[in-house]
Amino acid sequence: MFYVYVIKSGSSDKIYIGQTVDIEKRIRQHNDPGNNFSVYTKKNKGPWELVYKEEVETRRDALTREKYLKSSRGRSYIRTLL
């Protein structure tokens, strides 16, 4: 299974949308200042907290859903959840 997730910075209220197979590990990576997997979450200080997740069956489905959530319509949907 794959996850599409939204995390939010506790200090700047910025959001980040991504996909992964191991959501707990990925959130730890976002909060690790020594990790270089995401320039965006390193540049925008955390702490980053999970605010939304979806489970999908394939990476292709995860990438498709991630792309939608990053669109204007998808970001509007996320705002209604927050």
Image (spheres, rainbow, N blue to C red):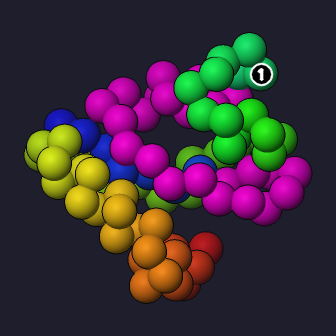
The disc labelled 1 sits on which kind of residue?
Pro
Considering every residue shown, the one lying at the far right of the view is 11
Considering every residue shown, the one lying at the far top of the view is 34
The percent position of residue 45, horizontal first and vertical second, equals: 83, 41
Q: Residue 13 lies in what quarter of the image? A: bottom right
Q: Which residue is mark 1?
A: 33
Q: Is residue 5 above or below residue 33?
A: below
The percent position of residue 55, horizontal first and vertical second, equals: 25, 50
x 85%, y 57%: residue: 12
The percent position of residue 43, horizontal first and vertical second, equals: 79, 40
Residue 18 visible = yes
Q: Quadrant of the N terminus?
A: top left
Residue 81 visible = no
Left or right of 24 on screen, residue 39: right
Q: Is residue 72 above or below residue 57?
A: below
Residue 18 on the magenta span: yes
Residue segment shown in magenta: 8-31
x 44%, y 74%: residue: 71
Left or right of 26 on screen, residue 11: right
**Mark 1, secondary structure of its residue:** loop
Could you tell me how many numbered marks the image carries?
Answer: 1
Q: Is residue 45 above or below residue 16?
A: above
Q: Quadrant of the C terminus?
A: bottom right
Residue 78 on the magenta span: no
x 27%, y 51%: residue: 63
